[in-house]
Structures are given as C-alpha cells and as structure tokens.
Amino acid sequence: MAKITLTENLEELALSKFDQLVESGELFYTPSVPEVVEENGFQFAFYVSPSIAKKPSSSAAGYAPAPKNPLGPFVDPDPNFVITQVGPHHTLEFNMFCVYRPKLLLHTTAWEAQSNALNEKDIAATWAVLHAMNMPQMILYNCGVKAGASQGHKHIQLFPKPEIEDFRLFPDRATLSQEEPLQVPGIPYRHRILALSVNATSNDVFKQYSRLLEKAKLDVSGAEQNFAHNVLATRDWILVIPRRNRDRNGQLPTNGAGMLGLMWCSSQDEKDGWTNRAMTEHLAHVGFPC
C-alpha cells in the first residue's frame, strides 16, 4: 500500500480553521475542566460541556438525523468543515460538537458501513493523521450500534490525548506486551490490548488490531459477521473492547471513550445520572463482564 503523505503543518491549519468555525458559530466548542471520580479502582474523567447538548439525538438504531442526506452527513460533507483528503479513500473533517480542540472525524469518502471492522486502508489513513499532528492523539472507533456508534457511515474519531491531573487511562498504568493480547486485571469488562512498537507502521498496527479482534471474538464466542466492538489507540497501544449493549434500558448510552472512563456529558444532570449509579457495573453490562 502506498504511503499517505500529509502537509507538515496539518495541526496548525486544523486549529486555525477550527477557531474560525467556532467564532462564526458553525462549530460548537465549550472548554471543560474534567472532574475525576473513582469507583472500584476504575477512574472516570467527566467533561460537562453545553456544546454536546446541541448534537441531535441518535435513534435507537444508532443513526443521527441527517435531513440533507438519508445516508448521513459524510456522503456530501459541508466544505467548510473539510480539512483535507487523506489518501484516495478517506476525508478528514471536524466534528461539529466538541469537547476537545480540535476533535476530528476521518471517514470513508464513499459510503461504507460503520458496522464493518477497520481494514488496512482505514488504519493507514488514521495512522497518517495521527503522525501528522504534533499533539499526542487518541483514536476511537465505535464499530456498530451496540458499540455506541451515532452515524451509520464509517468514521474514526481523533482527539488530543487528555492530560488530567490525578488521572491516567488504564492502558497507561498497565504493563503491556507487544506479543500477548492481555486482559488488564481489575477492569470490569472483557477487553484485549497490545503494546505498539516505537516505530510501528500502519501495517504493524493493522496486524495487532487483527490479533486483538480474533482474540476478543473467541473470548465472548462472537462469531457473527458484524462483531460490535470499540477500538481505542495511541502511538503506544491499541485496545479492543467487545460490546453487547449500547445502553441500559435506553439510558446512559456508552461509546468507546466512555468505556475507557472519558465521559462526555451535556449537563450536570447527565453527569449525575452516571455518578448516582454503579458506574463500573454499567460498563460491565454494556460490555462483557469479567
């Protein structure tokens, strides 16, 4: 596969355009100071941001309303939001409702289903964007409705890796292997994680992802074609979380960021809805309990 080359000042261009869209009122961004809460040894970082409240509610099928196009907003994206093409198959644009500055969406230019696993082209494009940004990035892919997807068009999210006082993502606290897909002790749901080498190529990342996906399916006897799961990654590790529920009785829908403890709330009431419940038990319910 040909190497994807992006402009060296991608981050500078993205931040400049992001700020212009916020100033014009086209993009919604409200900075939030996260509050750290710990339950049963699992850390949560709650962001309360009114910008999230402006996002249209997703349906039970996991598809947000898209009045201009029944296939969703990515088939014919607003040119003001598009940052660049990433290789021949992907488009990079802004998320309209942001907790982070910036939050990026990398979607297939032609329609592909969000219920499909990532392929080599997806990871090549994602890895190119991650390495073109100066700020350490996180990668998030919600594969399927049960994994918390809010759009049916295949897209990967990228956002700055949070730096929060007294908070560390559990993969950053664990001793990881590049060879053995691990289940980190003390995490309430089934998952598999692998370390990535310092000089990992997109092909290396795809191979690690494929190993994790195979192992996760075996863990939960998930042989169905559309295997709902979350993928999260940084330059240092890649994590796969199999999913069995999007929410619980229609409440507290949870995507991959939430499974990792990054909670994006539109209001204090929504945050209280989490903290007034057994949060780690909820994560086990929407995932697969250990």
Image: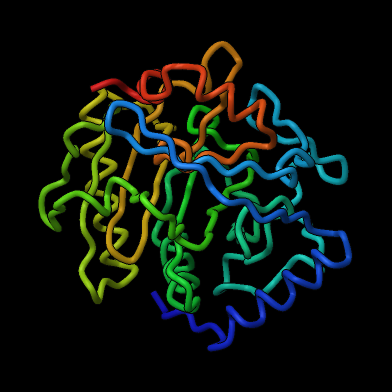
Image quadrant where one finds the N terminus: bottom left
Q: Quadrant of residue 178?
A: bottom left
Residue nearest the viewer, comparing 16 with 73 = 16
- Residue at the spot x=71%, y=54% of the render? 30
Residue nearest the viewer, comparing 225 with 14 = 14
Q: Relative to 180, is 46 on the left or the right?
A: right
Image x and y of residue 271, in percent: 59, 30
- Residue at the spot x=69%, y=72% of the render? 83
Q: Relative to 36, is 16 on the left or the right?
A: right
Image x and y of residue 120, in percent: 39, 61
Image x and y of residue 219, in percent: 21, 28
Q: How many numbered markers are drawn?
A: 0
Determine the residue located farthest toward the bottom in the rendered image. Answer: 8
- Residue at the spot x=71%, y=50% of the render? 97
- Is residue 11 positioned above or below 72 on the image? below
Image x and y of residue 98, in percent: 67, 53
- Is residue 264 positioned above or below 288 on the image? below
Q: Quadrant of residue 220?
A: top left
Residue nearest the viewer, comparing 239 with 109 = 239
Image quadrant where one finds the C terminus: top left
Q: Relative to 179, is 208 on the left or the right?
A: right
- Residue at the spot x=67%, y=26% of the render? 269
- Which color scheme does this rendered protein use? rainbow
Residue nearest the viewer, comparing 261 with 225 = 261
